[in-house]
Amino acid sequence: MNLEGKKILLGITGGISAYKSLELIRMYKRAGAEVKAVLTNNALEFVTPLTIQTLTNNKVYINNFDTSDYSPEHISLCDWSDIFVIAPATANTIAKIANGICDNLLTSLSAAYNKPFIIAPAMNCNMYNNPVVQENITKLTTLGYNFVAPETGFLACGANGTGRLADLNKIYLRTAELLNPLKPLEGKRILITAGGTIEKIDPVRYISNFSSGKMGISLAKCASKLGAKVTLISTFKVDGDFENIVTLSAEEMLKEVETQLDLQDCIIMAAAVADWKIKNYSSQKVKKTNTGDSWNIELVKNPDILKTICKKRTGEKPIIAGFSAESENLLQNASEKIKSKGCDFIIANDISRTDSGFSSDYNEVYIIDKKLNTKFIERTTKDEIAKIILESIFEQTGNYIKTGSVCSA
Ligand code: PMT
């Protein structure tokens, strides 16, 4: 894969495999990239600045307080580069990044960096398996850092286990993939709904639910990143790389979704649509003095958007997926819903949990298809869940290319 014109910032920390980063520089340069390297003081024990400078044809960066330039280097190097790759990354540096410590130029850069970031750990196998190191890696992965896992084999320290710097080709391919992201959903139009619908009682009050819209927004952002032309119908305004239509009530949402039905390749209903609306909306504020000590509000059924569009669809397009929000009998209720609503997929989530589902940044879901084939996705970020849902749905069409990368929103 071509890296012509790309600017790569390579971080080198103090491990024996630092010598391998010399070859990585050559690989990046051969592919047309420009490389600048930033080293920790410990890295200098393994490789020399002269070697790095000769291979990169650039100054080598080590010191936080280098005053040769008017601009602080931890900011100017961020601005200059398209990606930051730390290879090898020691347990020490990973721990510092995971905890926001900025005690040298490389860790200061890490804290300031807001573009694609790759970390390729290399260390002794006992260090790598240490739960503290693993916890740091999990934390950073959850935050959207891309890890290229070390390999298992004979290590420089004499041990045999996992900790050897990943094959340089893997680090190179991950870099190329993040710099030239594939667009497996290019040409597809996807409609997503998000948020809890708002059913007005009077000009002041309404009934709704605990949906934050996060699941739907993650789906919209991810689909857009993967190349789809996305329309997000939500119950509040959302900024992003997609068209956004705001509707409040279930009836308004139904109208918009119906308008879109024939235009879309796929519709995913992540909105928490109220099953009930107020029978008699009061155009004036209802006064306490008029209701007495109790107030009976009569509710009537809302239209079922998912069911309606599944019935109206004439051919195989669009693919239609719904969510099933359950507090008990998750799989049984979800399986019944896929049949009763007539959709192609149902994504079941447990909304009684406090660590996932409603309002959380995390979710844990079952993706169920019409034949009731079920795929379990254990608790992870909604961004990651969104990507797996989109992959699962579009793998059916046979033209989805796996990217392997997280859709961090
Ligand atoms: O928004 P978050 O805080 O991120 O939380 C995400 C979520 C829990 C809201 C989301 O993952 C979710 O489960 N969305 C669907 C909520 C819901 O309405 O579930 P349901 O089981 O009541 O409905 C099943 C499906 O029918 C849903 O796709 C729903 O959009 C649709 N429906 C429901 C009622 C109705 N009148 N019309 C509908 O179209």
Image (cartoon, grey):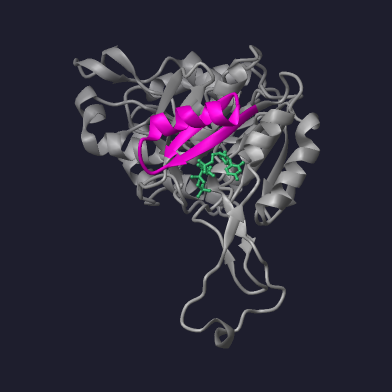
In front here: 203 or 92?
A: 203
Residue 177 position (above or below residue 10): above
* Residue sticking out furthest to the bottom: 289
> From the viewer's perspective, is 289 left or right of 159?
right
Quarter of the rendered image showing ligand 1:
top right
In front here: 255 or 283?
A: 283
Residue 284 magenta: no
Q: Residue at the location (55% across, 67% down)?
A: 297
Residue 246 image point, x, y percent: 72, 53
In front here: 9 or 372?
A: 372
Residue 338 magenta: yes
Q: Residue at the location (27% across, 19% down)?
A: 162
> From the viewer's perspective, is 129 left or right of 72?
left
Residue 146 image point, x, y percent: 47, 31
Q: Residue at the location (55% across, 84% down)?
A: 288
Residue 185 position (above or below residue 399): below
Image quarter (top left, top right, bottom left or bottom right) of the C terminus: top right
Q: Can see residue 328?
A: yes
Q: Can see residue 50?
A: no
Residue 221 image point, x, y percent: 63, 40
In front here: 99 or 27?
A: 99
Residue 174 image point, x, y percent: 53, 22
The residue segment tinted magenta is 320-349
> From the viewer's perspective, is 236 left or right of 138?
right
Image quarter (top left, top right, bottom left or bottom right) of the N terminus: top right
Instruction: Give the total number of marks visible in the rendering.
Output: 0
